[in-house]
Every structure is written in structure tokens, then in C-alpha cells.
Amino acid sequence: MGNEVSVPIEVSARHIQLSYDDTVKLFGKGYKFSKLRSLSEEKRYACNETVSITTPKRSLEDVRIIGPTVDQTRVELSRSDAVQLGINPPIRMSKSIDLQGTPGLRVVGPQGSILLKQGVIIPKRHIHVDPSDALKFHLRDGNNVRVKIEGIRALVFDQVLILVEENMPFVLHLDVDEANAAAVYGSPSYGTVLAEK
């Protein structure tokens, strides 16, 4: 990569994506989620509805549902969330369909509950970029870069994955722990893409 590039930051809190079958079990047949807001990723949206997630150690309430439905239900947590729940999820890409080796938990909705045998991950930090911007900024799909965050808790994130996708805004996704470590609060916040590794 040539010149340093400024990238907007979005912070992803704990959330769940449900399969159709699990939606029926939790909310009842024919239930339609209501949209709270659109997300930067095309076709994805935060719902007004939430669920609880629980393990033998602890429960977390008001876990936001992200639509639309997916093939396999999956839960995305921060490391701090996982510690509270007493589980040890691997770091995986949020769109990964490879859920083998991931822990499960119980999900509780207004009409019932489900016991996930697997599907809990910690999302890998990543940058979405459209092909035209990838060409412009000399970024390659699947490569890793470093991103510097300025400010009172300035730091450099290593191993930030580049994801080149059509119709995607140029944005860095961090989880809550990562954002807190860099004192990233609110929007707009920016990082600087330093170099590929």
C-alpha cells in the first residue's frame, strides 16, 4: 500500500443472527422483525427485538437481533462477554459458515428457547472495501494491514483483515473491547491504515 489512508470506524456490540427455524421457535410462526436501523453492510439491519443468552454461569439480556435470517444461527460476542458467560469462543470472521469447534449456549425469546450446540464466535477485526476503493488504495482481499488509532489511548491494531466486496462502504469494524481499548466512543471516529503485512 502506498499513502496512508483514513478509514471510518464502526463498533459492533454483541448480537445474534437467527435461522428461520430458530426464529419460529423463539418468536412464533409468521413473526416479522421490525427494523430499528439499517447497517452499513448491504441488506443487514438491526431489529427492535432482542433475546437473552444464557450459560450455566450467567445470562446476558437484550442481545440485539440482526436481520435478515441466516442458514445457521450464530452469536457474536466480545472477549469480555465470553468471560462473563464462562465460555471460550474462537476468533472467526462474522460471515464465516465454519462454526465447527465453536461453543454453544441457550437463547431465550418471548415464545420459547433453543439450545445451540455451536455457533458462538468473537468476530475478527476487519475492513470492508469496495473493489474500486481497493484498487485506489492498493488493498488486496485476504491481506492483513495495521491500523493506527490516534487520541488519548492511541494504539495500533495489527492483523486487520481486508475484505473486498461489491457495494460495501469503506469501514473498519471493531468489537466493543477493541473500541474501548482505543477510547473510540461515538461517531465519527477514524483510524489510519498503515501498511499491508
Image (cartoon, rainbow, N blue to C red):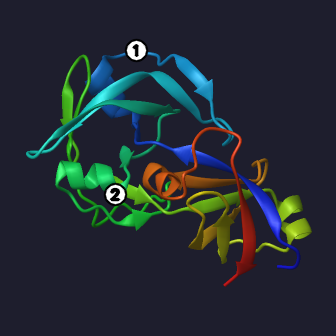
Residue 58 horizontal/vertical position (percent): 14, 41
Amino acid type assigned to the residue bearing label 1 in the image? Gly
Question: Residue 145 appears in which quarter of the rendering?
Answer: bottom right
User: Would residue 71 be found to the left or right of residue 42 on screen?
Assistant: left
Residue occupying the point 49% across, 24% down: 47
Task: Report if the CB atoms under discs 2 and 1 are less than 8 Å apart.
Answer: no
Q: Nearer the viewer, residue 109 or 5?
A: 5
Question: Residue 15 appears in which quarter of the rendering?
Answer: top left
User: Would residue 45 be found to the left or right of residue 162 on screen?
Assistant: left
Disc 2 versus disc 1: nearer the observer: 2
Q: Nearer the viewer, residue 30 or 170?
A: 170
Residue 175 horizontal/vertical position (percent): 48, 52
Query: Above or below — where is 106 with respect to 38?
Result: below
Q: Which label's residue is closer to the chain start, 2 or 1?
A: 1
Element marked by disc 2: helix
Q: Nearer the viewer, residue 5 or 27?
A: 5
Residue occupying the point 55% across, 20% down: 36
Q: Which residue is mark 2?
A: 79
Residue occupying the point 79% across, 47% down: 167
Q: Is residue 133 at least partly visible in the picture? A: yes
User: Would residue 164 be found to the left or right of residue 15 on screen?
Assistant: right
Q: Is residue 95 at least partly visible in the picture? A: no
Residue 30: mark: 1
Residue occupying the point 20% across, 23% down: 112
Q: CA distance from mark 2 to mark 1?
A: 34 Å
Amino acid type assigned to the residue bearing label 2 in the image? Arg
Residue 56 horizontal/vertical position (percent): 8, 45
Element marked by disc 1: loop
Count of marks, rendered view: 2
Query: Above or below — where is 169 with respect to 143?
Result: above
Q: Quadrant of the N terminus?
A: bottom right
